[in-house]
Image: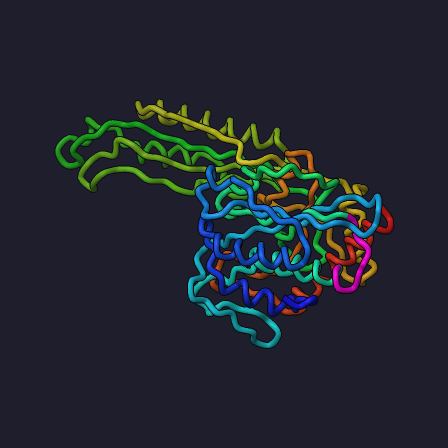
């Protein structure tokens, strides 16, 4: 690898490497080599035993050039929301697209490419920066699984996760908690034509409960969704069992808890009316974070944006991020927008200018941290 990295060339290369959740190994091996050539101490953790991926999370450490500067973490995830086997990205009028049949994978390979190119700039031009920790996680797209099982002893004072929505200059300092609900309604089977009155239709009971509940946007910081419903055995059998998966998110944990309680209470009430039974399980998927504007992580990002003349946008998100998990570990992290548009679709794309601006932004943030914080 040359001393400098063209971020567009780097992105185009790794975008061709299929890395669907659980099958990130090929990309991971390539990135370990890249990081080592840049002078990092690199390790791959043993999280694959728990995650089932064909690789663990990557952890890399770079010595700083400024004594006493805060240790900064940079992170992105290896996996894409869908497979990209055989996909060759194309550039049209300054914008990078997939072949139109799969996702592009800029979520989050754009973040990876920006980090690599920024590290190369720091090294080549001997720019000031503190000690750096880099993490590339597996299975982010299926529940932040890699971050949850990260075994590294991280030393960073704060960090930046390059996986945010919005253009470069977007700083996501608030994200919600999420509770997952698994609901099972047990009714009673019967012949749908001969004796339906002897059955209890679990699908009807469950759908009645759902119809009585709010879903979608509850308020500006709370959402609820019924994502999957499945049950029944045949069209001529009264359905005796139905399974529903749902979620509630909120940046206000009290609101989330109340909405979860409302869902379970309504299901209990409704299925009882039908003579059915309910089994309900809940699990906290991740906890909310809220990093104030005065925190060095945010202050440095805002200052770097001013230095570059990039419009800064401090905002909240409704999505979950590896930053949620790291904040719960006591490592303050914000997410940065990287300019990906229409992610999770075959129309996903990213402007070349956003990749290039992302590199300049990370370099400026790290210089700001090293000099002023």
Is residue 18 at least partly visible in the picture?
Answer: yes
Task: Where is residue 168? Give x, y as percent.
Answer: 69, 59
Task: Where is residue 128? Give x, y as percent.
Answer: 82, 55
Up-down: is 297 above or below 91? above
Judge left or right: residue 255 versus residue 262. Answer: right
The stretch in magenta equals 123-130
In this figure, which colouring scheme has been used for the structure? Answer: rainbow
Query: Could you tell me which residue is drawn at 50 percent across and 56 percent down?
Result: 344
Seen as rendered, the residue at the extreme bottom is 93
Task: Count the labels in the image.
Answer: 0
Queried whether the magenta region covers residue 332, the answer comes back as: no
Is the N terminus in the top left, top right, bottom left or bottom right quadrant? bottom right
Task: Where is residue 75? Give x, y as percent.
Answer: 64, 49
Query: Could you tell me which residue is drawn at 69 percent across and 67 percent down?
Result: 4
- Magenta stretch: helix, strand or loop mostly: loop
The one of 372 and 124 positioned closer to us in this rendering: 124
Is residue 160 at least partly visible in the picture?
Answer: no
Judge left or right: residue 284 versus residue 232. Answer: right
Judge left or right: residue 251 versus residue 24. Answer: right
The one of 365 and 116 positioned closer to us in this rendering: 116
Query: Could you tell me which residue is drawn at 42 percent across and 32 percent down?
Result: 182
């Amino acid at each position: 690898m040359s001393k400098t990295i063209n971020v567009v060339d780097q992105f185009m290369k790794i975008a061709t490497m299929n890395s669907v959740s659980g099958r990130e190994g090929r990309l991971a091996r390539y990135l370990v080599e890249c990081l080592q050539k840049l002078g990092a101490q690199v390790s791959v953790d043993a999280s694959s035993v728990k995650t089932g991926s064909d690789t663990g999370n990557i952890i890399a450490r770079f010595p700083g050039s400024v004594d006493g500067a805060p240790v900064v973490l940079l992170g992105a995830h290896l996996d894409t929301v869908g497979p990209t086997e055989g996909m060759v990205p194309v550039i049209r009028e300054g914008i990078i697209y997939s072949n139109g049949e799969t996702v592009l994978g800029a979520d989050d390979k754009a973040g990876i490419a920006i980090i690599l190119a920024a590290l190369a700039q720091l090294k080549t031009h001997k720019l000031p920066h503190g000690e750096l920790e880099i993490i590339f996680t597996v299975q982010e797209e299926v529940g932040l699984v890699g971050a949850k099982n990260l075994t590294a002893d991280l030393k960073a004072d704060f960090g930046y996760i390059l996986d945010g929505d919005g253009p470069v200059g977007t700083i996501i300092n608030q994200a919600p908690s999420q509770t997952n609900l698994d609901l099972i309604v047990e009714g009673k089977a019967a012949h749908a034509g001969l004796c339906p009155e002897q059955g209890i239709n679990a699908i009807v009971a469950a759908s009645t409960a759902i119809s009585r509940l709010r879903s979608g946007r509850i308020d500006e910081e709370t959402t609820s969704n019924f994502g999957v419903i499945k049950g029944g055995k045949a069209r001529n059998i009264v359905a005796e069992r139905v399974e529903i998966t749902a979620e509630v998110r909120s940046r206000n944990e009290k609101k989330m808890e109340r909405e979860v309680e409302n869902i379970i209470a309504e299901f209990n009430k409704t299925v009882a009316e039908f003579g059915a039974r309910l089994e309900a399980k809940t699990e906290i998927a991740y906890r909310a974070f809220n990093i104030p504007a005065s925190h060095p992580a945010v202050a440095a990002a805002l200052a770097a944006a001013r230095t570059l003349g990039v419009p800064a946008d401090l905002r909240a998100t409704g999505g979950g991020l590896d930053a949620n998990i790291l904040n719960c570990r006591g490592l303050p992290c914000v997410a940065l927008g990287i300019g990906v548009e229409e992610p999770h679709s075959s129309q996903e794309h990213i402007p070349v200018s956003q990749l290039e601006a992302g590199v300049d932004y990370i370099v400026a943030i790290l210089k700001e941290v090293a000099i002023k914080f």
